[in-house]
Amino acid sequence: MLWITPQKVSAQVSINFQVFYDNLSPYGDWVYNPNYGYVWVPDVDYGFTPYSTDGYWAFTNAGWTWISDYSWGWAPFHYGRWMYDNYYGWLWIPGSEWGPGWVSWRRSEGYYGWAPIGPGISITFAYSSGYRLPNNQWTFVRDRDFGRTNINNYYVNSSVNTTIIRNSTVINNIQVDNSSRVRYNSGPNRTEVQKRTGRSIAPVVLRERRSPGQNLGKGELQIYRPRVTKNNSNGQKTAPTIVSKREDVRQVSQRNSNTQSQKGNQQARQQQDQQQNNNQQARHQQDQQRNNQQEQQNSNNQKARQQQEQQQRNNQQAKQQQEQQRNNQQNQQQRNNEQAQQQQAQQQRNNEQAKKQQEQQQNNNQQARQQQEQQNSNNEQARQQQQQQQQQQQNNNNQQQQQDKKRGPKQ
């Protein structure tokens, strides 16, 4: 979303709907509509279509702006909305927001198209998937012819609208007027249009005009576009000076018959142009079909080569996986053998240690026996010594007794 600040020569003034009622009355009839209030029926020839008849699109600093050949075009093509009525034809419903053109934009391969947005439709809803306009209300032109000042000579016959719309997409190029905060669609991308038309597009600068009307010259579009409110400053409702009755307004089918004949001739020319375009399109489609077939064949060949290369990569990958698997198995077998050898060596070390422990135990047992024998020997020596002492004592006692006997009794 872009913010656009239009060029100004003076501050915008504020007006109400009365300026529409007064300035458009000479060019049509104001009638009352129960749904939308006062609406305007332009006094135009049969076949008139807003944003299609007597005008063209010019690129300005606000986007693609409708330049009308009607003197009253400054108002109905830049404010409000249009709707089609079976009795009156096209009606204009006044609005308060200025925009370069209140239309819905679409593009298809080779085409640009637009259609008036209906009343009560916000710019957000107009470009949503839920909003649909009748196919016959769309105007299409080949993209190479978009931006011409005589664009009405290049409109595509409406009989192919359905096909074009079915293959089209919305151009959602929403911008915002920085001074009024109004959101609008500025239309096709300028760079894209230059590429498709092969023409350089110099933007036209918008300038404020002080009175109703518009004029284009020297790269400037001077247009009257004041701020608009529905009622006057004191809140009172505004109304047309003259409101026509239904029966006082010519039906759309009763308007200028010469124009109908001209329109028939124009349609014949358009049909002839359309036939030429169809023939050219048929040749283009044949060329496109051949190109598509060639591209498809090239694509198939490329896919086949890619599949073959992929198969080769898969085979190589499978071979690498097999080799990796063999290497893994060999490495695992080697690790298992090394682990078995380590376990065997450990077992040998354990056996040797057990043998050493057994020998140590035997030595300990032998030492214990020797110590026991030594103890027994010590005990035996001790008994023998005790016996010897006792014998010695007995001998001493015996000797003492003998000595006592020899001395005899004491005197």
Image (tube, rainbow, N blue to C red):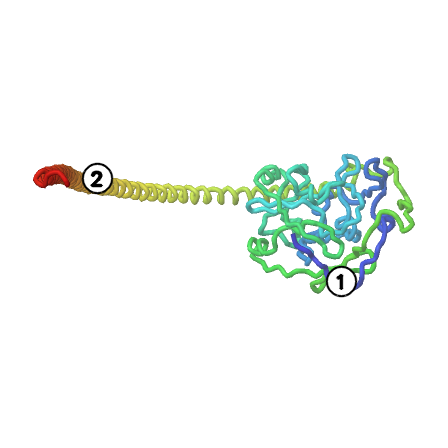
Q: Residue 145: x percent and y percent?
A: 60, 51
Point out which mark residue 336 bears: 2
Residue at the spot 75% in from the left edge and 43% down from the top edge: 82
Residue 121: image quadrant is top right
In the image, residue 33 above or below residue 178: above
- Position of residue 246 in the picture relative to residue 70 (left or right): right
Mark 2: amino acid: Asn
Q: Nearer the viewer, residue 298 or 327?
A: 327
300 left or right of 379 in image: right
Is 267 situated left or right of 372 in this image?
right
In the figure, 136 relative to 225: above or below?
above
1 vs 2, front mark: 2
Mark 1 neighbour class, 10 Å CA radius: few under 14, some 14 to 19, many 20 or more: few
Horizontal and vertical percent position of residue 133: 68, 38
Give above or below for 371 relative to 74.
Answer: above
Residue 136 drawn at (x, y percent): 67, 38
Q: Which residue is disc 1 drawn over? A: 8
Observer able to see residue 25: no
When asked about the image quadrant of residue 10, the answer is bottom right
Labels 1 & 2 near each other (Cβ < 8 A): no
Under tag 1, what secondary structure? loop
Looking at the picture, which amino acid does disc 1 mark?
Lys
Residue at x 79%, y 46% (from the top left corner): 95
Q: Secondary structure at mark 2?
A: helix
